[in-house]
């Protein structure tokens, strides 16, 4: 009997010790980060969604438990867009940032807006804010967010060519885009504006060039015939470009700050008569890049108590 008691006490002690060791290894702080970028969405279909990835140091934390989430929004000090959570996807990927391992989760979202008329909103210094049912909330800087909704869609124009010019400027950099547009209805179509769907990028409207094609990797300065300054403040200004049949336009880009942009969409504003219409060129990946890891020192780590 005494031996059984000793064995029982020993077993309980071992289990207790294992529990203590396990609990001592559970991080007391959740660390969350993401690569800040320009998120944008042109909604022509109410079922459209977009994705925001979060890197989290703990696998399966309360942050990614969909049942715990009360509400999600993108906001800054002045503006707010409510979002519906479609799902959270574990990407089964670990990323090392500054000698720390993070798990990658994708939050699949769509705007929660009831709209009947054309609408747009642009949010700089945007945060992703997640509120939980127990009252806690987290707020993560994601970069910028732009959203455009159009009540009606016309097919006066169609995309006939899309090609990005990538130069090596201490890393791959998208410096210009060749856009081909075709007039489908032979109306008098006049392009009035070409808007990059990235709040960090403008087009250099007075340097748009008619161009059939270019060799990939060709220096943008050689294409334009003079030294081109990629990084300078530049405001979008309207253009007047007629599309009688088909036109190929080389669009030089201007960056407000140095960052990596390998995916970009455009909004084309055009007029027929005195009425203005819109055409969306969806985000297109012009080159593959994991170069954001080089910028890991610029990642902001947000810390919250682990529940």
Image (cartoon, helix red, strand yellow):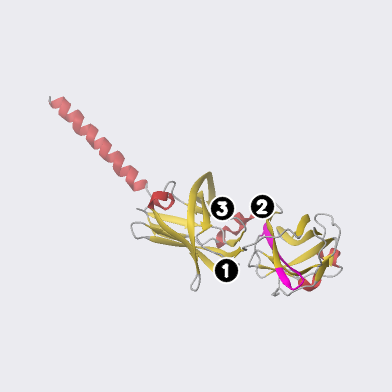
**Which of marks 3 and 2 precedes in the sequence?**
3
Mark 1 residue element: strand
Q: Which residues are magenta?
A: 261-276
Q: 293 and 127: which one is in front?
A: 127
Marking on residue 121: 1
**Residue 242, position as x, y percentages in the image:** 82, 68
Residue 239 can be seen, yes or no: yes
**Residue 247, position as x, y percentages in the image:** 84, 61
Judged left or right of residue 154, residue 74 is left
Query: Which residue is labeled 3 in the image?
Result: 47
Q: CA distance from mark 2 to mark 3?
A: 28 Å
For marks 2 and 3, give the one nearer the viewer. Answer: 3
Judged left or right of residue 237, residue 297 is left
The residue depicted at 48 percent of the width and 73 percent of the height is: 77
Q: Main secondary structure of the magenta part?
A: strand
Quadrant placement of the N terminus: top left
Judged left or right of residue 186, residue 40 is left
**Which of marks 3 and 1 precedes in the sequence?**
3
Question: Is 84 rendered above or below residue 269?
Answer: above
For marks 1 and 2, give the one nearer the viewer. Answer: 1
Question: Is 184 rendered above or below residue 2?
Answer: below
The residue depicted at 82 percent of the width and 67 percent of the height is: 188
Q: CA distance from mark 1 to mark 2?
A: 28 Å
Query: Which residue is labeled 2 in the image?
Result: 289
């Amino acid at each position: 009997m005494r031996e059984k008691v000793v064995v029982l006490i020993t077993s309980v002690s071992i289990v207790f010790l294992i529990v203590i060791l396990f609990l001592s290894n559970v991080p007391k702080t959740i660390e969350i980060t993401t690569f800040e970028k320009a998120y944008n969405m042109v909604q022509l279909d109410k079922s459209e969604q977009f994705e925001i990835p979060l890197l989290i140091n703990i696998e399966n934390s309360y942050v990614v438990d969909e049942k715990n989430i009360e509400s999600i929004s993108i906001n800054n000090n002045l503006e707010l867009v409510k979002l519906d959570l479609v799902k959270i996807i574990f990407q089964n990927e670990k990323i090392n940032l500054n000698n720390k391992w993070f798990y990658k989760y994708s939050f699949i979202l769509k705007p929660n807006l009831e709209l009947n008329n054309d609408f747009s909103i642009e949010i700089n210094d945007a945060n992703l804010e997640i509120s939980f049912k127990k009252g806690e909330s987290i707020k993560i800087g994601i970069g910028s967010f732009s959203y455009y909704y159009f009540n009606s869609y016309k097919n006066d124009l169609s995309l006939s060519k899309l090609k990005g010019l990538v130069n090596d400027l201490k890393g791959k950099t998208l410096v210009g885009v060749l856009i081909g547009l075709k007039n489908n209805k032979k109306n008098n179509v006049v392009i009035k504006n070409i808007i990059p769907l990235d709040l960090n990028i403008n087009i250099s409207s007075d340097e748009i060039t008619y161009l059939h094609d270019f060799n990939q990797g060709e220096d943008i300065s050689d294409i334009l015939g003079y030294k081109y300054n990629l990084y300078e403040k530049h405001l979008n200004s309207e253009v007047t470009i007629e599309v009688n049949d088909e036109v190929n336009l080389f669009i030089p880009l201007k960056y407000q700050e140095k960052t990596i942009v390998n995916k970009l969409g455009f909004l084309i504003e055009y007029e027929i008569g005195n009425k203005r219409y819109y055409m969306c060129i969806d985000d297109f990946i012009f080159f593959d890049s994991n170069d954001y890891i080089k910028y890991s020192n610029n990642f902001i780590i947000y810390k919250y108590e682990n529940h």
